[in-house]
Image (spheres, grey):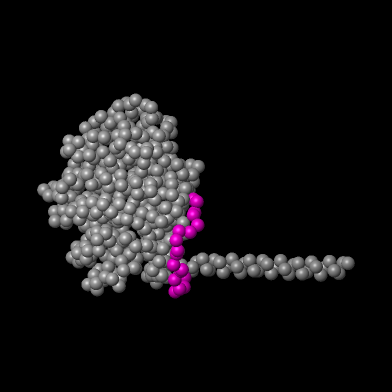
Amino acid sequence: MGEKSRSKGGCCGWFIAFVILALVVGAIVFTVKKKFSHSGSDKPAPVPGPPGAVDQKYSTALKTAMQFFDVQKSGRLVDNKISWRGNSALKDGSQAKLDLSKGMYDAGDNMKFGFPMAFTATVLSWSILEYGDQMDHVGQLDAAQDSLKWITDFLINAHPSENVLYIQVGDPVADHKCWEKPEAMTEERPLLQVNASCPGSDIAAETAAAMASASLVFKKTDPTYSSTLLKHAKQLFTFADKNRGSYSENIPEVATYYNSTGYGDELLWAASWLYHATGDDSYLQFVTGQDGEDYAQWGSPTWFSWDNKLAGTQVLLSRLSFFKAKDISNSYSSGLHSYRKTAEAVMCGLLPDSPTATKSRTDDGLIWVSQWNSLQHPVASAFLAAVYSDYMLTSQTPKLKCDSDSFTPSDLRDFAKSQADYVLGKNPMHMSFLVGYGDKYPQFVHHRGASIPADAKTGCKDGFQWLESSDPNPNVATGALVGGPFLNETFIDSRNNSMQTEPSTYNSAVIVGLLSSLVTTSSAVQSFT
């Protein structure tokens, strides 16, 4: 009996030792594989199919983010889904005999700024064109198209003749002296315009990009509306091109809020969208010819934002290199190659393990460029990375070369997820910066309508009691993506801290694009037409 017991114990000991050894070896192999996984093999990953399994985290976040567009709507609200919002700004544009009542308020104020509003429409269009199937899979496509049309209806009316574009509704100085709900506004709402004698190539071209991209969104469902949008887009591009000048140089007062650092990027962005919408080679000639040489900054990665469209243009034109190279004249191939190479440089800068990785990020890995509205750049960057990843997957491009190293589409997707997850709560503050998502999110959002009780009767000045109140907002600005954390990953939840707690409509566009890309497993890239 005793001998048998010793034998059993010996076998057991050897077994345990073997298991431990196997675990140690397995851990080493896993670590090595993880360290070098981005190099991957030369074999491309399988081409993705239709939208797959839904990731509930991103699906819920997308449904949340989409609601902020309804929060920001101006005009006579149809099928209003926000209980504390109502009709507002119904007379906007009346002094010019125009109906400019639609559109969306820019941020936490009651202004309509045309430059970021047009950018919002362009990015929302792009998101629908790339990921409309995934939006539809989780019931958000109709909402996205409705929100887009609310903006493009405004943009159409803001362009009453070929060389006139109304670019702003409201006086920001007067607006910022008030703290009131948009429904209660009684102040004058003056208009600003650009025209042939006071040009604004940047804002006219961005509006052209918005209309050209939206024309593709509505091409099948509403061809008449699509044609109208395309007509305006062509006219606005011609206006922007033939009457060159910066809107914030010609109208200096707008520089306080949305100063443009140049118009070349918008001209290239607009021409790129017009080529996709029309197939007209003259637009391809524009982006690859002298204007590309002058403005594209080939070889120099930039950040994608409402002010700088270059990185977005490079990724968008890479679409042609990935999928339409055989159909495009050789005379354009060199220029398109330069856009593609620069897009690759942008991607290499974003990937944290890349030899050329940007150092512009927090300790926890969030891309961080600006203390004002710090989340715009990481979310916009992640959206571009997700799009580029799907271009690579669908075209069976196995690797992205970054100096001596190489990376796979899944590396780009992992980066995109890391930025989305940070926004949704995987951060040192354990806070979601998307209002209404998760258990902990900002309660003191810098937003007039959200801060004032729905039944309060306030005028211009007495509403400031709600700005100064120590109570959380009585209304939840659901879907608002606030400014975000500081570089040291701190966040002060205060209505007076507009740098961190003010949301914006263009933030909503980029977060909707990013979440739409992640809401299901990667789906195959489809033709815009």
Q: Position of residue 424 (x, y in %)?
A: 46, 48
Q: Position of residue 414 (x, y in %)?
A: 45, 60
Q: Is residue 318 above or below residue 448?
A: below
Q: Position of residue 7 (x, y in %)?
A: 81, 70
Which of the 4 image quarters holds residue 132? Answer: bottom left
Query: Which residue is at a point 41% across and 56% down the rendered structure image?
Result: 133
Q: Which residue appears farthest toward the right when viewing the image?
A: 1
Q: Is residue 360 visible?
A: no
Task: Give the quarter of the figure containing the N terminus.
Answer: bottom right
Query: Which residue is at a point 16% across and 56% down the rendered structure image?
Result: 238
Most foreground residue, 104 or 461: 104
Tell whether 118 sits left or right of 383. Answer: left
Residue 47 forms part of the magenta stretch? yes
Q: Is residue 260 above or below residue 389?
A: above
Prevailing SS of the magenta stretch: loop
Most foreground residue, 477 or 89: 89
Q: How many numbered marks appear?
A: 0
Tell whether 238 sits left or right of 342. Answer: left
Bounds of the magenta span?
40-57
Which of the 4 image quarters holds residue 295? Answer: bottom left
Task: Give the quarter of the figure containing the C terminus.
Answer: bottom left
Query: Which residue is at a point 18% across and 50% down the rendered structure image?
Result: 200
Q: Is residue 56 visible?
A: yes
Q: Position of residue 194 (x, y in %)?
A: 16, 46
Most foreground residue, 452 or 226: 226
Most foreground residue, 281 or 402: 281
Tell whether 394 sits left or right of 162. Answer: right
Query: Which residue is at a point 69% across and 69% down the rendered structure image?
Result: 18
Which of the 4 image quarters holds residue 311? Answer: bottom left
Residue 175 forms part of the magenta stretch? no
